[in-house]
Amino acid sequence: MTTDRWQFLRRNHSADARGGLGRLDLPLLAIWGQDDLNVDASRNAAIYREILAGREDGTRIVLWPKATHGLLKSAAYNWQLTQDWSLFAKLRFVLEGRHAYAPGILDTIMGWIEDRSRDGKAS
């Protein structure tokens, strides 16, 4: 583990956004990659669902299958840090462009943004 990574973990290991999340008064799209190596995606999504339960304002909490922390296809890109990627993975990422992302994820994000714009809730 690099010194920078260790410092990041030391600063953030006890971070807890629950208080701020509960006060959020606008729509939220929260997406975790199901194969995330950095956080417990299922646990975090469950916490968000519990805190934001009952909201009817366009909030969506999603656990995306076969996706990484960065919502890339996990079969090809599931390293904890991008600097750990093999040369092949880096080249593949450049060549795949938007297709490196988990199938359907970018359309889901864009659809959510478009829905907020139509609802007049985008700022």
Image: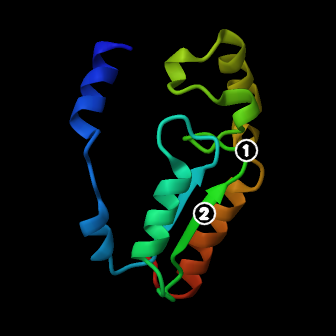
Residue 123 visible? The answer is no
- Of the residues shown, which amino acid type is indicated by label 2? Val
* Residue at 50% in and 18% down: 83
Which residue appears at 27% of the width and 39% of the height? 12
Is 13 located above or below residue 60 in the figure?
above
Q: Quadrant of residue 22?
A: bottom left
| Residue 82 at x, y percent in the picture | 53, 24
The residue lying at 64 percent from left, 48 percent from top is: 34
- Give amino acid for label 1: Lys
Residue at which label 2 appears: 62
Mark 2: secondary structure: strand
Residue 10, horizontal then vertical, whole percent: 23, 30
Query: Nearest the camera: 116 or 72?
Result: 72
Q: Percent position (x, y) of residue 1?
A: 38, 14
Considering the image in quadrants, where does the C terminus appear?
Answer: bottom left
Q: Is residue 44 above or below residue 18?
A: above
Q: Is residue 3 visible?
A: yes
Q: Residue beneath label 1, please?
A: 66
Report how far apart the C-alphas of labels 2 and 1 lie in the structure.
13 Å
Above/below status of 45 relative to 25: above
Rate crowding at label 1 as few (under 14), some (14 to 19) or many (20 or more) other CA atoms within 10 Å: some
Q: Is residue 28 above or below residue 67?
A: below
Q: Is residue 113 left or right of residue 87?
A: left
